[in-house]
Amino acid sequence: MHFSLLRHPKQKQLLLIALPMIASNLTIPLLSLVDTAVVGHLEHAWYLGGVALGSSLISLLFLLLGFLRMSTTGLTAQAFGAKNNQGLRDNLLQAALLALVLAAILLLLHPWVMSLVQQLSSASSEVLTQAAVYFQVRIWSAPAALLNMVLLGWFLGLQNARYPMLLLVLTQSLNIVLDLLFVLGFGWKVAGVAAASVIADYSTLLLGLYLVKRLWQQLQLPAISVAQLKQLSGYKRLFALNRDIFIRSLCLQLVFVFIAFRGAGFGDTVVAANAVLLTFLMLVSYALDGFAYAAEATTGKAVGAKNNAEMQDLFGILACWGLLLGSVFSLGYWLGGNSLIALLTSITAVREQAAIFLPWLIALPLLAVWSYLLDGIYIGATKARAMRNAMVMAFSGFAISYWLFQPLGNHGLWLALSVFMLLRGITLAIPLYRYGAAYLLK
């Protein structure tokens, strides 16, 4: 690995995808801050708790279905690299049909989902009531939200980062404007926050469909064929791919759910300190996701074109970016970690606890960066089974590590998370180290 690779001709192609996605990702935490600020100024704290619980439930459901975007990106990028226009058409239509089926299932089951949450949660009745209000409005965005995932993946697979950026910026900015209008202007409270998200999702879908029409005409894709949509062979591959990515995503979410629940057992101050530090870890993921998306698109294209040399170059470029970005974040948290903590909380006890566990945050960017970038490579190559197996091994490592080190208290929790991130990268890197880029072409 040499940093001269950052001047490689393929660098421009990678950055044209990565930089717009990083810029649009920055709007995501902004929306969360606006939601918190708007609801946080209502007369009762349970409104804020209800939005937090309801939005967490929606986010969990949608994140678990994130395979819709990932699989669409990989399959589309490979069809694009192979110059297979029929494949570009079929990948979009089959994924869209699956998204609508899954959205229908969510809409049918949502009363039972909310009932189960109310039975299992220890939140107050007021918070649960407001969470139900949010959830029962927001769930109706499922068809648009899941179709938007498909469109996002399709555009990325076509090496087009401008359209995804437009979709993400529209979703977040319209959401923010409607938040202010519905809550502060109309007084709709929690229902207003949820309604803002629903309208933003459907508005984004309309823009996305317009952009699909434009690309469809530019690429001269074949007309929609009902006969092709009925062919089971395409769905079998899609279902197998999505099944494995779902298992991978489930393991990932379980780790962070466990951290939240177990951290709560160490007291309110510790759980608050963990939340502050995990917020900064999320900033790392927002930056790295841009390069992960670029890795998905460029790897898929190279796999479709059977271009071994291009993939080898891509590995080197991404490794350089990984080391550079991981080092920048770790150095930034080392030099300014306490100041950043002070920006998020004025509570002295929470600041002191966060400072105690800050060294884990300093180390994590360098440990975690490889898993993000390698995930992108594997998604582009549609190596979902290998991703699933790697995640299961990393998840097992997390469980064993915490079991061994739980006498360390919260330090044991952070140590287990560090082991988990490191194992994700190692288990994904081993096949590439042993077999090189040829492994992705099998």
Image (cartoon, helix red, strand yellow):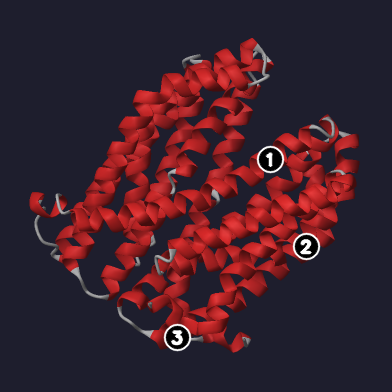
Mark 3 or mark 2, earlier in chain: 3
Q: Which mark is residue 258?
A: 1
Residue type for callout 3: Pro
Q: Is residue 169 left or right of residue 422?
A: left
Q: Position of residue 440 (x, y in %)?
A: 42, 76
Few, some or many residues within 10 Å of mark 3 (<14, 14–19, 20+): few
411 w.r.t. 421: above or below: above
| Residue kind at label 2, given as amino acid type | Ala
The reply to whether residue 164 is visible in this rendering is no
Residue at 56%, 22% in the rendered image: 117
The residue tagged 2 is 363
Point out the frontmost of discs 3 and 2. Answer: 2
Which residue appears at 37% of the width and 63% of the height?
Answer: 74
Of mark 2 and mark 1, the one earlier in the sequence is 1
Q: Residue 121: which numbered mark, if any?
A: none
Against 58, residue 234 (above or below) is below
Which label belongs to residue 9? 3
Q: Pick whichever, 6 or 249, lies toward us.
A: 249
Label 3, label 1: how many angstroms apart (C-alpha)?
43 Å
